[in-house]
Amino acid sequence: MALQILIVGPAWVGDMVMAQSLFMLLRQKYPGAMLDVLAPAWSVPLLARMPEVRHAIELPAKHGEFGWGIRRRIGVQLRAQRYNWALVLPITWKSALVPFFANIPKRSGFRGELRYGLLNDIHTLDKQRLPMMVQRYLALGLAQHAPLPAIPPMPRLSASAVSRAQTLTKLGLSLGPALALCPGAEYGPAKRWPAAYFRVVAEAYAARGWHIWILGSTKDAEVAAEIARDHAAWRNLTGATTLAEAVDVLSAASLVISNDSGLMHVAAAVDVPVVAVYGSSDIRYTPPLSTRARVVSLGLSCSPCFKKVCPFGHYRCLQDLTPERVLQESAIL
């Protein structure tokens, strides 16, 4: 019988994209393995673009909700699947409940929140050995202390020509050179490059005849409107696409300029050129996993601070990172 693996996935878009590296490693190591991923509802369309995943199992608990009853019910239901192994990527106590209730014999995860008993293959997180999030995911798929691949498998979301064409037609987007901007960052303002700077970069590419597409959620509509102000030809798509459609649109772009966000990781995973702007976050921890991506960061002494809001109030890590610098980096790609 083929190895049956249940993976409890992360709760953020970028983290889920990086988790694909683990899925790829597992399929390489265990060619006949069946991989199912338990994850929030929003991630189902994203997981559908990962050929390594057999089934996406929706976890209906809301973000931050403990959901004991929900997790127990799902775990009991999953007993019939007879999984051999569960890998729990989040470090929370509640994330280990479903594999426990599912009676999965091997339950792997990092030590965190007193999960003894819930997990029985507990890894100790050595941040010096595993500085990157993707390395930590990969480590759970290997024997403890086993060497990691020198180069992590690069996430690759599928975006077929048919799906891409259908999405572009639906949104009324024209083919041709296109710059996609992703000015949002769910985490907070300390990860958001100024709208005025995105606008300068967009104007430079628009002057060359490029289409300008702006993507994000409804939360990014205000900043997108500021970027596109007085430019009727630029397409503000914030809140107008599903996550699956955003994958298609980004795969059709000629270049993506993005904050460190979930969409940045999506863009890297559809293998288009990406310039990623980093402020409060760490380029060593969650870099875009692509050979076609370049990271722009000032590396100030106060960064990375990992704060949502600049503790000093000056946001120099973003304010001092000029549009000219980003244009220089984009010219290299």
Image (cartoon, helix red, strand yellow):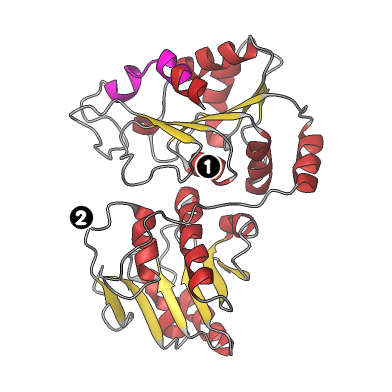
Residue range highlighted in magenta: 316-327
The quadrant holding residue 319 is top left
Q: Nearer the viewer, residue 182 or 22?
A: 22
- In terms of sequence position, does the residue under pointer 1 or pointer 2 come before the other? 2
Taking the spot 43% from the left edge, 13% from the top edge, the residue there is 324
Q: Amino acid at mark 2?
A: Gln
- Name the secondary structure under disc 1: helix
Q: Nearer the viewer, residue 255 or 29?
A: 29
Q: CA distance from mark 1 to mark 2?
A: 25 Å
Number of numbered labels in the structure image: 2
> Which amino acid type is marked by label 1?
Ala
Give the residue at x 47% y 75%: 71
User: Which residue has dot 2 on it?
Assistant: 128
Marks 1 and 2 close (CB-CB < 8 Å): no
Q: Secondary structure at mark 2?
A: loop
311 and 157: which is toward the camera: 157
Q: Nearer the viewer, residue 260 or 101?
A: 260
The answer to whether residue 251 is above or below residue 45 is above
Mark 2: few, some, or many residues within 10 Å (few <14, many ≥20)? Answer: few
As displayed, is residue 260 above or below residue 227? below
At x 59%, y 90%, the residue is 1
Q: Can you give x and y, in whole percent of width and height, for residue 58 in the image?
A: 58, 67
Q: Is residue 320 magenta?
A: yes
Dot 1 alpha-carbon crowd within 10 angstroms: few under 14, some 14 to 19, many 20 or more: many
